[in-house]
Amino acid sequence: MFLELLKRDHDGIMSRLHSIFDGEASRADMEARLLQYYSECYRDNKCFLLWVEAKLQSSRDAKFRAQLIQCIHPGIVATYDCVHYRVFKVGRDAVTHAGEAVGARADGLD
């Protein structure tokens, strides 16, 4: 059940990130939307403490860590692919930091 709660929250996070890169937004628009998102994402995230607990649990339990990675990895890959697609539409500088930010969600879980 713990993993399912994290997966639902992760899916919501990934959906919001995808919406930032969808459409024909300019570089400035995407940067502004991304800054807005990251300024609010942890403040408004009711599951933040669950993610902290998952991080602690994954550092102690290899089986849990593997299950958590399996659960969230597809969303991270999909968002990373979306960011890279935008590289060709808007330009490399516009999404380099966004791609790093998306990858940072999984830091410490592998």
Image (cartoon, rainbow, N blue to C red):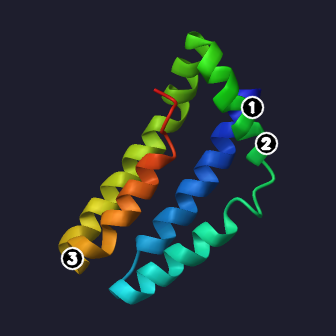
Relative vertical location of residue 104 with respect to residue 54 in this rendering, above or below = below
Left or right of 81? Residue 14 is: right
Relative horizontal placement of residue 21, taking residue 32 as reference (left or right)? left
**Label 1 packing within 10 angstroms: few (<14), some (14-19), many (20+):** few
Q: Amino acid at mark 3?
A: Gly
- Cβ atoms at labels 2 and 1 below 8 Å apart: yes
Work out which residue is located at the far left of the displayed protein and give it.
88
Q: Earlier in the sequence, mark 3 or mark 2?
A: 2
Which residue is under mark 2? 49
Q: Earlier in the sequence, mark 1 or mark 3?
A: 1
Q: Are marks 1 and 3 in contact (CB under 8 Å)?
A: no
What residue type is disc 1 on? Glu
x, y percent for residue 46 = 81, 53
- Category of crowding for the residue at label 3, using alpha-carbon neighbours closer than 10 angstroms: few (below 14), some (14–19), many (at least 20): some
Mark 1 sits on what residue? 53
Which mark is on residue 91? 3
Relative to 58, residue 53 above or below: below
Image height of 11 relative to 28, above or below: above
